[in-house]
Amino acid sequence: MRTAIISLTSNGSRLADKISSKVGGQIFAKGKHFTKLADLVAEIFGKFDGLIFICAAGIVVRTIAPHITDKLRDPAVLVIDERGRNVISLLSGHVGRANELTVEIAKAIEANPVITTATDVEGKFSVDAVVSRFGLLPEPKEAIKAINAAILRGDDVFVTAGEVRLNLIPQNLIAGVGCRRGTSSLKIFEAIQRACNMIHQPIERVKLLASIDAKKEEAGLLSLAEVMGLEIKFFSAAELQSKIDEYKLEESKFVTRSVGVGNVCEAAALCCVEGARFALPKTSFKGVTVALLWEK
């Protein structure tokens, strides 16, 4: 899950640093990274899997309102007061995993998690939250509501075709890969496998590999794609830079010196599909970086 932490004050900035150091997240501080909050939100709303605001809830509601579209596709939105007392799950609690992220951050900063979705309040599971953890997209929304309402009432819910049918659409994974010259196929495979293990998914869910065209002749990468029976797509530095700019991806000076662009794995994966969510943002292993994206 790739998150943006947005702060408006100096106290908020200190809390943002604390959150980023404990659970990760890319920081956007007013005055340093942006001037107008509305402009920043318009730019990044669909580009991050989660937006964590450190400010008043009312400011956030007014700012994100024009960009909200669909509970199955909107990012997770959290609000935290600048003293770090309460972490509020505001939007996309289930499919977007805002509730899960709220609990994680609250634990990390010793705050109070505020979750208001009915099933969570009643201590019951929600079908959309459960299936999203397995990389399944639940549709249609009406069926989600009907099943969750039945769970709340205490009705028996059977996994069979009936009056209400919920479609669970499997999502494959795209693996963006960066590697040092001469890295063996085994090391790249192990890195991808470890990345999949981190999100509790089998490596068989990976259906596409992606990297920079400077790696077109990289024997280990090509051999791995052949052994796994996967297509591998290569993109130019200019194409990757376009995604870096669009998604405000963090860049590495070392990688820039090596291949001419500062982010390979995340940018390459994003070149393969529009509007996707990160299953795992850039993660470094020995000589290999991997980013996993849910294919839509």
Image: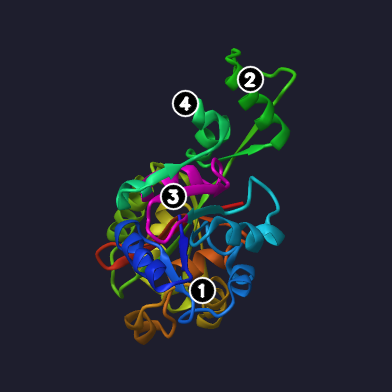
Q: Position of residue 83 (x, y in %)?
A: 37, 59
Badge 2 or badge 1: first in the primary sequence: 2
Label ID, residue 104:
none
Badge 4 or badge 1: first in the primary sequence: 4
Task: Quote the CA–CA distance across marks 4 and 2.
Answer: 14 Å
For marks 3 and 4, give the one nearer the viewer.
3
Instruction: Specify whether residue 104 is painted magenta.
Output: yes
Three-letter residue code for mark 2: Ala
Task: Provide the residue designation for mark 1.
Answer: 248
Q: Is residue 179 above or below residue 273?
A: below
What is the quadrant of residue 181 in the picture? bottom left
Task: Quote the CA–CA distance across marks 3 and 4.
Answer: 19 Å
Task: Quote the CA–CA distance across marks 2 and 1.
Answer: 42 Å
Task: Provide the residue designation for mark 2.
Answer: 150
Badge 2 or badge 3: first in the primary sequence: 3
Three-letter residue code for mark 3: Val
Task: Provide the residue designation for mark 3.
Answer: 87
Q: Is residue 181 above or below residue 166?
A: below
Please state which of residues 256 and 79 is positioned toward the viewer in this rendering.
79
Q: Position of residue 241 (x, y in %)?
A: 52, 80
Tag 2, which secondary structure? helix
Task: Provide the residue designation for mark 4.
Answer: 123
Query: What residue range appears in magenta?
Result: 80-105
